[in-house]
Structures are given as structure tokens and as C-alpha cells.
Image (spheres, grey):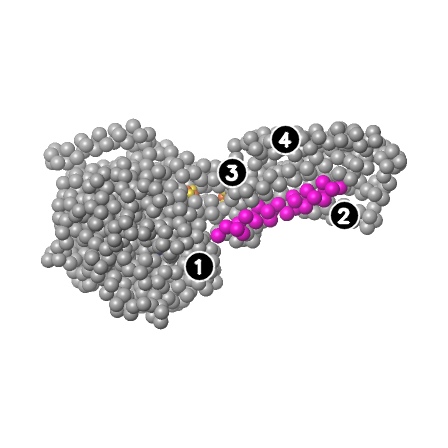
Amino acid sequence: MTIKLISGCIGCGTCVASCPTDVLRLDPKTKKAIIKYPADCQICHLCRMYCPVDAITITPDKSIPVIVSWG
Amino acid sequence: MTSLSKDPTLLSRRHFMALAGGIAGMATLSALGVPSGWAANTAKVDVDTVNRKEHTSDVLVIGGGMAGLFATVKAHDAGSKVILVSKGRLGSSGQTPFAKGIFTYDAATAPISLDAFVDKVSRSAMGTNNPVYTRQMAEHSRARVDELRQWGFFDSPLYNTCFSKPIKERNIPVLERIVITHLIKENGHIAGAAGFSMDSEKIQIFRAKSVILCTGAGGFKPNGFPICDLTHDGTIMAYTIGAKVTGKEWNDGHPGQATNAAACFDGWHGMFERKPDTVGVEVHHDLGVDLNYIAYVNGGPVAMGPPGSGNTTSKGGPLTPAEFARPPGGPPPGGGKAPGNGGPPSGKGGGPPGMAGIPVGGSSAGMSIHKSEGLVPINDRCASNIPGLYAAGDALGSYMAGAIYTQIGSSLAGSAVQGAVAGTAAADYCKAVDFQDVSTAKLDDIHQEILAPLQRKAGYSPAWVTQTLQGIMIPNFVLYIKKEKLLQAALAYVEELRDHHMPMLRAADFHELRLAHETANMIISAEMKLKASIMRKESRCSHYRLDYPEMDTTNWQAWINIYKGADGSMQFEKQPFAAWPA
Amino acid sequence: MMHSQTNRRGLLPAILLFTGLPIFIYATGDFPRRTLLKESISLLTIIGFCMMLAQFFLTRSGNSLLLGSNMAKVIKIHKIIGYVFVCIILVHPFLIVLPRYFEAGLDPAACLITILRTYSNSGILIGIFAWCLMSILLVTAIFRKKIPLPYKTWVQFHKWLSIACMIFACWHALDLGRHTDRVLSAYIILLAFCGILLPLKNSKSPTVLQSEISRPGKGEISRDSF
Ligand SMILES: Cc1cc2nc3c(=O)[nH]c(=O)nc-3n(C[C@H](O)[C@H](O)[C@H](O)COP(=O)(O)OP(=O)(O)OC[C@H]3O[C@@H](n4cnc5c(N)ncnc54)[C@H](O)[C@@H]3O)c2cc1C
Ligand code: SF4
Ligand code: SF4
């Protein structure tokens, strides 16, 4: 599921800014980070590394099929 | 945009066959669970309420990577009022966040002279490099590295803080999460740029005397290389307003991993968490399409030998100059030193994908060798053929390294050096010119063009079009091991996407709006890649033609420039190696 | 001795309820496991927080529930737990950023600053408020004898301050806690409800408190040892 879970988020917004592909957004109601566009996650871990409370969990698998050059 | 006739009777038999195959391909895709393509669009944004915000500066820098950082700082220091705008966060977008080794040439301690260094790069690059930019990179690298050190670059694996330091000290405005979609040209000169902000959901207009594109390179949102935010936006925007671009036939041949191919972080074995370091002179002939050739001939899985040893593992295939060939079965590169795009610093653990486990191709599909693709420079100061428009780093087709990876760590160094050169040049340019007037009518048009995908009642989803494009372009036998017939076949698909799908890309919100614009850029990039690959009837460095496997020094001591013809069609020209455009 | 026997019998369920259960909830919950240091810090904070809630049951008013009526023991335990776990809770913001020190990425101090500057939602502000109240609680407990307040008034002050503090602390924990999933949240709410309601119930009859204090002999303590 690529970026998988956010727990213990304090809503600082750092991950939203740090994600190159705009996967994360702050929920307008709770003001906490949500995984809004998981299909666009490139599994680069920048969000996790930048989160001040280390709230983000990422797994290496991708839920949509991955196209490579041979298989 | 080129508009070809949509009359089906004009379809040639070849086109027809290709399209029929495509339908089969798409059926496979949908079986895999790819979201369906065409559907009604329910936009969650009321387009009529989207406001416009205007900004003015002497120099506008687009892109917050290594090149953008130096362009901004140096343009400011040369006396210009500067704004830095970026799609992502400063130091946390583009490729810069992931590069860990930066080349520095220190004349006092270097094992070879500057002249000898430039010659060695040229030999490895088989003449494809521009020695002026090779030399400039080496000559200025030390000064840039020293500045980076002062800002704290080498103290953390995360670059936002150190990049922000010189920008904050100079009080330079930084606008992040703004996607630039248009460059504005008036009276033959650059006049600014336009785009939209993903958070405030506004149209953003920038008026500037000079614009520096530091938008990096791009790809087809491939899996395994962290470039899914880069779709050659700068190149395509510049091409659209008449700039010449180059380098589309070359390929970056970084492999990914067969297991969890999309996991960049895991594929790079923790390298992203490492602090950066410097590297000294180390010239190779690396990461072209050797591995792709082996996989093509033998089938997967392939065993990864040392880079450059590919042609010795299998008969034929891409040619490595004897001087740079590595013995087969030599020490695994991951252990001693890891090759990268110029590679990370040696011996610190980690390393690029394919070093452990089974490698698979296409991880950086759509990207050429760094610095070989992008805007064509008309001089050694990063100027394009459009007055006031500059480009630096991966956005400039400077051929600094040539059409293959030569000096380790020179990609990062080159972006820093060129950023600084372009920043100073743009500031100088501003002193002699005035702002160009841009009519409201023109701005209104751009406004409409930007928001168009949100206004479509129905259309194709960018995600689906992207995956379809990936299915067409990424196979080894299309993008890497090239032959006329398949390049033509793929081109038929891509032209279909360009003519029928690109004008019908839909978006429900600003995230999808970004995807829609990115997808359009990828389609044009794909067209450029295929056409340039068809044109270059030889094999050299990272361009390999199965039907023209030899290097052709009679006809092909030349780069290919691409530009938009008067009728809007895509035009190609040859530019002799080591010459500036006419 | 009779009293100590009652105590020992009550101690086990108490330990189970206030530490065993949260550890169990943590262990069986669907949380991503991280490094030993990070997990230890999390566990310590969870236990610390639950022990803060347990304090409401280790008072004169809430005593008889678990530990019988050996007031000397109860009060001693209350004090030890109080000092130890209040300190843990007070340093937990620092503990959260501590592991960053051992990683190459962010600077722990910078993380802490980011945390303290986050006001987009109320969670951090409430936490800071609770943290301040808890600091006051700690200081006024350490220097109780130096505070010119009649003992009875101090007890009231201590009680109400604890209640206020824990209400905000619970709010903060339920809002931002990494491990406060549904089960742990329910547990916290239940404990807080019982713990806070109990002293509230008793506060309606201050005579109980008064009469207990006036009988130092029974609990084998004097006011000064409080
Ligand atoms: C995994 C990995 C490892 C690497 N390792 C090394 C190494 O060890 N050594 C080395 O020398 N090189 C390495 N490289 C290459 C190096 O990272 C790049 O060559 C270099 O960082 C390019 O810098 P840049 O500033 O030119 O472009 P980028 O860093 O790509 O920056 C592009 C910027 O433009 C912005 N942008 C793009 N489009 C738009 C738009 N439409 N509107 C607004 N903004 C936009 C992006 O948000 C980004 O901020 C590596 C690359 C990768 C991916
Ligand atoms: S892993 Fe990278 S792409 Fe995925 S959400 Fe985090 S920052 Fe974004
Ligand atoms: S960086 Fe961490 S704490 Fe901040 S919003 Fe993102 S997940 Fe929440």
C-alpha cells in the first residue's frame, strides 16, 4: 500500500510540503495529515524523514500494477 | 500543439496494426486493475471562482533543486530582485534530495590536470559532451562545494534547512507547491510565467525580465526512481514558446529491483538517509543500456556485473571504449564504490538498485543522461535561443557529461555550477532590458488553458493515460533496444494519445489538474524521444539501435535539436558536436 | 500485619489494571513496530500516562477501592508514582524527538521547535497547557511544606489541579497519541471517568476528608508526612 499509515500526527504540515508528488494533505476538519492520493506515492520516504514526530509508516509494495521494462 | 487529422481513413495499415495491438495491450492493463480511462468528470472546484494572483521580479527562478538554489542566490547577489517558485519544497523535490555524492575538482590535489580531465570525459563520452560545459563544471565545482559546506549541506541527509539558509539570509521570497505550466513570451522576449498553486487553488502569474528554468529533467513517472514529480515541464513549456531542446534519444539506464520495483527508498538501500559527501576525479562510462541489451538477448533475470562490463558479458550490444571497459566478474560495485549518476560517495554502505537482488530495467524510463537533455544553450552562460530565458542543471541540455555517465558526482556539481552561472547571466541581462507588457487577453487565455481539464464535462483520467503511455514506452524493446519498426509503432500510439487524449484530459481537483498537465508533457516528451530515436541512425553511448548497431562518425558527429516549426509541427535539426547553434 | 496483607492483595490487580492492561492493549494493537528505543519510549509514555490516571485511585478519597485503607502505604505509593511518572510525562516531548539524535536526518531541537509551533489544530496547545499544569502540580507537591496554605486547602488545590490537568492531558492524548486507537482510548476514557468522578463524588462531603485527616492514628501517618 506504499505510504500506509499516519499515527500520532500533530498536524504540522511538514510532510504535505515535503512530498514531491502531492500525496499528502491536511484534513480540513481534523487538521491532521491524510494520505489523500496514495496512487501517486513514489515510496521515497521524504515525508517520513521530515516528520518531526516520526508518525508516518511506509511499506515497499505498491497497490497498483507496476510497469517495468522486462519481466 | 500539433494537430493531425483525426479522419480514420487516413490511418495507414501500420498505424492500424499498432492500434489494434494497443487495444489488446489496454485490455491487459484493465485486467491488471488499472482505473478505467474515459468517464464523466465531476469537478470538485468551481472554476469561475478561481482567483488570479500576480507577482513581479527581475528574475524568476523556477525549480527548488540544486540548480534553483544557486540561480536564486547568485541572481540576487548580482543585484536582481528574485523570486523562487517551485512545484515542490526547496531541497525536497526533484532529484536533488536523493543525490549524495558531489564532485569537486581541486586543482591542487587532483590527480590529473583540468585539460586532461576534460579530454578523458570526452573520450568516455565518445565526443558527445560539450567540453566548454565539462570544463566549467570542474573549474567552478570547488567554489560551489565550499559554499554548500558553509550552509551546512554536508551535515544532514535532508537538504531543506541548509538550502533555506542562504535564501533566508537574503530575504528572497520562496513560493512552494506552485505548478508552473506556461512560459510567457512577448515581442520575442521572455515576459514571465504562469501556473497554479495546489494549496490556495489560485492561478499564479509571474512577470519577470528574465526566467531561469531549473525544473530538472523528467520521465514517464516510472517505478523505482524518485522522479515521479518531474515530467520535463520546463522543456515542454520552453519548446511551446519556441525554444530549442535537445537530447531526447539518450537513455538513463539505471536498473531497479525486481521485487517491489516501485520502492525507490528500499531499492537504494538506505542511501537516501545518508549525509552527502564529496567525490574526486573518477571518470567512467556507466549506466547506459548495457544491462537492457543483456536482458533483451538473454531474457531476464539478468545478473548485474560491474557497469561498463555489459558488452563483455554478451556479444554485441552497446560499445564501451576500451579504456573504460571493466573486467567481467570484477568486484561488485556496491562494495567498494557505487556507481550512480555519477554516483554516491564510496564505501559508505547503501548503493543504487540492482546491486543486491535481481535488477530490472525501466526504473528511470523517460529520462536521458543528466545534462544531455533540455534546452539548447546558445553560449557558455546557459542562455537559450529566447532572449531572457535561461536554463540550468538538468533542465539545460548542456552535454556537460555527454550522452553517458562519465564523472561520478558531476550531475549535482553541474547543477550547482550552472545555477550560479545562469543566475549571474540573467541578472546581467536584466540590467539592460525592461519588463515586457503582457495583455490581459493573453493572461485570460492562459488562465483558461490552465483550468481547462477542470471544466471538461467528461474525458480521460490522467492516471489512466499515464499508465497507457507507460505500457507503450517502457518495454525494453521500445525505449532501450531500439529498432525502426517498433519506434514507428509506438509513435502511432503516442500520436493517438497526443491528438485524441491530450485534449480530453480531465481533472476533478487541483491534484488531478497537476497530473493532467504533467501527462500532457509526458506525451510530448514521448513523441520527441521516439522521433529523435528514429532520426539517429547509429548507436553511441546510451542510444542503442539494433538495426544500426555501429557508431557512425561520418553522419552523426552531431546532436539533435528539436523545435516547433512555424506550422506548429515538431522539427528536427542536427547541430555538430562542439559547435553552438547557428 | 493485617494492613499490609490487604495492600499486597490489592497491589496485584492494581498493577494489572494500570500497567498490565495498557501494555496488553499496546502489544495486541495493530501498530507499526519501530526501533527498540522508539518502542521503549512509547511504552514508557503510555505507562506513565496510565499511572497518572491511577493516581486518582491512590488517594484518600479513592483509596479503599484497590489498596485497602492502609493510608500510609497508599500515600507513599502515590508520592513515588507521582514523582516518577510526572517526570516521565513532563519529559515526553523531549523523548519523542530523542531518537532523531541517533538518526542522520532531522535535528531533535528543530523537531521540538516544529512541534511547539504547531497550532493548526488544538492538540499541541492543549498539550502545552496540560504540561504547564502538571509542572505546577509537581512543584507545589515538592514544596508543599513551604507553601503557606493550610493542609486542607492544599489538598483541595492539589485535587482540582490534578483533575484539570488530567482532563487536558487526556484530551491531548486522545487527539494526538500515536497509540490511542479505539481500545486504548476507551480504556483511558473509562479510567479518567472513574478516577475523576470518584474524588468529585467525595468532594461533595468535605467532612469525610476532614474526619480522615483528623484521625492520623488510623493511617499511621501524621499530616507532616504527607
Ligand atoms: C536517486 C538519485 C540519486 C542520485 N545520485 C547522485 C549522486 O550521487 N551524485 C550526483 O552528482 N547526482 C546524483 N543524482 C542526480 C542529481 O540528483 C541531479 O542531476 C541534480 O540533483 C539535478 O538538480 P536540478 O536542480 O538541476 O534539478 P532537480 O533537483 O530535479 O530540481 C527540479 C526542481 O524543479 C521543480 N519543478 C519541476 N517542474 C516544475 C514546474 N512545472 N513548476 C515549478 N517547479 C517545477 C521541482 O519541484 C524541483 O524543485 C541522483 C539522482 C537520483 C534521482
Ligand atoms: S514516500 Fe515520498 S512520495 Fe510517498 S508520500 Fe512520502 S514523500 Fe510522498
Ligand atoms: S509531518 Fe508528521 S506530524 Fe507533521 S503533519 Fe505530517 S504526519 Fe503530521
Q: B252 and B386: which one is in front? A: B252
Left or right: residue B534 versus residue C142 is: left
Amino acid at circle 3? Arg
**Counting other residues with Cα less than 10 Å from the Cα at mark 3, is it few (<14), some (14-19), or many (20 or more)?**
few
**Mark toward the start of the polypeptide (4 vs 2):** 4
Left or right: residue B100 versus residue A34 is: left
Tag 1 and tag 4, C-beta contact below 8 Å: no
Amino acid at circle 1? Phe
Per the rendered image, the range of residues in magenta is: C79-104
Tell me, yes or no, if residue C117 can be seen here.
no
Question: What's the mark number on residue C33?
Answer: 3
Counting from the top left corner in percent of width and height, residue C137 is at 73, 45
Instruction: Tell me which secondary structure the magenta stretch mostly adopts.
Output: helix
Alpha carbon distance from label 1 to label 4? 47 Å
Query: What secondary structure is found at the residue carrying circle 2?
Result: helix
Residues at marks 1 and 4 on the same chain: no
Q: Residue at x 72, y 44 (%)?
A: C83
Q: Which residue is mark 4?
A: C21
Answer whether residue C103 is magenta in the image. Answer: yes
Question: What's the mark number on residue C145?
Answer: none
Q: Which residue is mark 1?
A: B153
Q: Quadrant of ligand 2?
A: top left
Residues at marks 1 and 3 on the same chain: no
**Callout 3: chain:** C
